[in-house]
Image (tube, coloured by chain):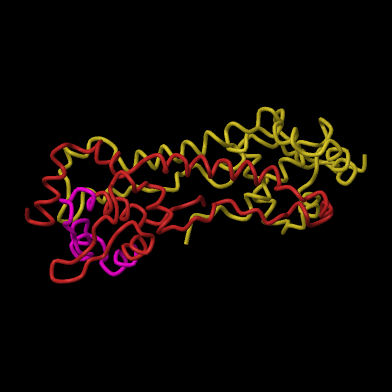
Chain colours: A red, B yellow
Amino acid sequence: MGVKLPVSTEWVLHCATTLAQLEPGSSASGAQLAQYFDLPAPYLAKQLQSLTRAGLLAATTGPRGGFRLARPAGEITLLQLVEAVDGVAPPYECREIRQQGRGALAPEDCRHTCVLAARMADAHQAWRDSLAGVTLADVLGEIPATAPARTRRLLNGS
Amino acid sequence: MGVKLPVSTEWVLHCATTLAQLEPGSSASGAQLAQYFDLPAPYLAKQLQSLTRAGLLAATTGPRGGFRLARPAGEITLLQLVEAVDGVAPPYECREIRQQGRGALAPEDCRHTCVLAARMADAHQAWRDSLAGVTLADVLGEIPATAPARTRRLLNGS
């Protein structure tokens, strides 16, 4: 029971946070990121591709190729990352049961969104607003000051 | 892909809203509610039992038995209804991948909740707060003034 985001949501958030710590212009490959967090590389690659398609990551080719942020960390929100991989569909689906069965309302009484669906949509929007208010730059501001140097050393050997 | 609440969430919200429209002391059976919305009775019965266990509905026995709200409509929130049937587990699960793989942080660096998990928890709390701010009485205040009389007529023949 209960609504669940896939385990890969955590992967995506951590990989993006990791890429946000690299020197501008540096990148890390999917294989490196998979190793960094001990994740299944093929499945992670799919998520990284979704982030690239969404314009959040840029894929570079060549021997030093890999992924980097496609824009500044202050312009990438947690909502964008989550929705890029998990989709934008709201968790509550109104199937208009108010229009079926013995109590079915007439179509003319259902021109407006069902009150219950509207309140569920409000809650989803509150969730979205919360995640839209946090950028990768905000996240970097809350990790130890020594973290980026360590991340760069482990990933880029710099 | 995407996080989904079960279809039964809509059932539960509508059944509770329906019961909130009955005369005080009146009840409706699970079979009546199933018919009212054309829902599978055995599966709906399970949801109604969950609401009863959560103290939101009261089950009465006897020939006119059934379900009624266990407390005033102003004291039952959408959050209570949703969590009674869908559980309280947050959708984002932090599996501490920051502590695994080549980039694994030392345990002493993980005494605090991961920043990403904390921000995902904030968003879940925003969703909860939104739904906790809406009672069944609020919902009744937004449906047509003629609705309760119709609901009573169809369900209790009164």
Within the image, what quadrant is residue B65 found in?
top right
| Residue A69: quadrant of the picture | bottom left
Q: How far across and how far down the image is residue B144, in percent?
A: 81, 39
**Residue A1 location (% of width, % of height):** 52, 52
Q: Is residue B86 left or right of residue A140?
A: right
| Residue found at x 64% / y 41% | B51
Q: Residue furthest left?
A: A158
Q: Quick check: is A45 in the magenta stretch?
A: yes
Residue A33 is a magenta residue: yes
Q: Residue B139: which quarter of the image?
A: top right
Camera-nearest residue between A43 and B108: A43
Q: Where's residue A79, x and y in %?
A: 41, 48
Q: Is residue B31 left or right of residue B115?
A: right
| Picture layout, residue A52 above or below residue B32 | below
Which span is picked out in magenta? A18-47
Residue placed farthest to the right in the image? Answer: B158
Q: Is residue B49 left or right of residue A47?
A: right
Q: How many marks?
A: 0
Q: Residue at x 61, y 54 (%)?
A: A93
Instruction: Name which residue lies at 52% across and 33% down.
Output: B129
Name which residue lies at 54% across and 52% down.
A90
Residue A19 vs residue A15, the one in the foreground:
A19
